[in-house]
Each structure stands twice: as C-alpha cells, then as structure tokens.
Image (cartoon, rainbow, N blue to C red):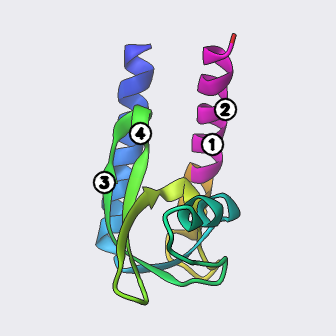
Amino acid sequence: MVNNYNNISKEYGVLTERIKENLPLKAYPVPEFVEGFKKTGNQITLKTEMKIINVHNGGELIGILCTALLNNGLKISCSLTHLDFPTSTILYNEITAYQIKRIARVKIIMAAQHN
C-alpha cells in the first residue's frame, strides 16, 4: 500500500513538472465543475476559457491541483480532473491518461468507503 502510494505520488510529480514546464495551458471546465462553481455566485459555462497558470502535486490523496485564471481576472483552484483540454494542447495525451486513471482511483476509494 505505501509503495503504491509512493509510486502514484512520483507519477503525479513527473506529470506536474512536465505541465509546469509548458504553462500556461488553455482549458475549459467540465459540466460538474460548472454546476458546482455556479453555487458560489460566479457564472461560467462549458465554453469559459481558463488559463492554467500553476499546478501542484497533492499526491494520491488529492491529485494534481491547478490554479486557473479566468478572463475576468478571477483566480481559482481546481483538480486537473475537472478540466477539459483542446486536443492540440501539448501533453494532451498524458493529461487525459492521468484524468482517466485518477477518476477510476477516486471511484474505487469512494466505493470502498461506502462498503
């Protein structure tokens, strides 16, 4: 278990550093993020362009966190899994692979907590 945690944290760290080297990146919020963000009184849509200006490796428990800048100057933090990237984005394949694996891991953790 600890070894798996260390491997995942290292894997996230490698991707985090690769993303940092290629900032800023353009991204868009996923539907779940849009709905949650509206509850804060701020209005965004699936077409709201966000500029990723920083990332942080939170390890297996948190995942990769992003600091994004909206067109209105508002800075927000969100999970890399809550963003969609244009297919032309550098690291698109690596980011998408991370998102798929991370979402699967979170589902397993959530299922285990409910049993």
Label 3 sits on a secondary structure element that is strand
Q: Residue at x 39, y 18 (%)?
A: 3
> Which residue matches tag 1?
103
Viewer-proximal residue among 43 and 45: 43
Q: What's under tag 4, amino acid-wise?
A: Ile
Say whether residue 15 is visible: no
Q: Residue furthest front?
A: 41
> Which residue matches tag 3?
56
Q: Residues within 10 Å of mark 1 (few under 14, many from 20)?
A: some
Mark 1 or mark 3: name the one nearer the start of the chain.
3
Distance between the Cα atoms at labels 3 and 4?
10 Å
Q: Which segment is the magenta one?
A: 99-114
Say whether residue 100 is visible: yes
Q: What's under tag 3, amino acid-wise?
A: His
Tell whether label 2 touches label 1 (CB within 8 Å).
yes
Q: What's under tag 2, amino acid-wise?
A: Lys
Tell whether label 4 touches label 3 (CB within 8 Å).
no
Q: Position of residue 8 (x, y in %)?
A: 43, 34
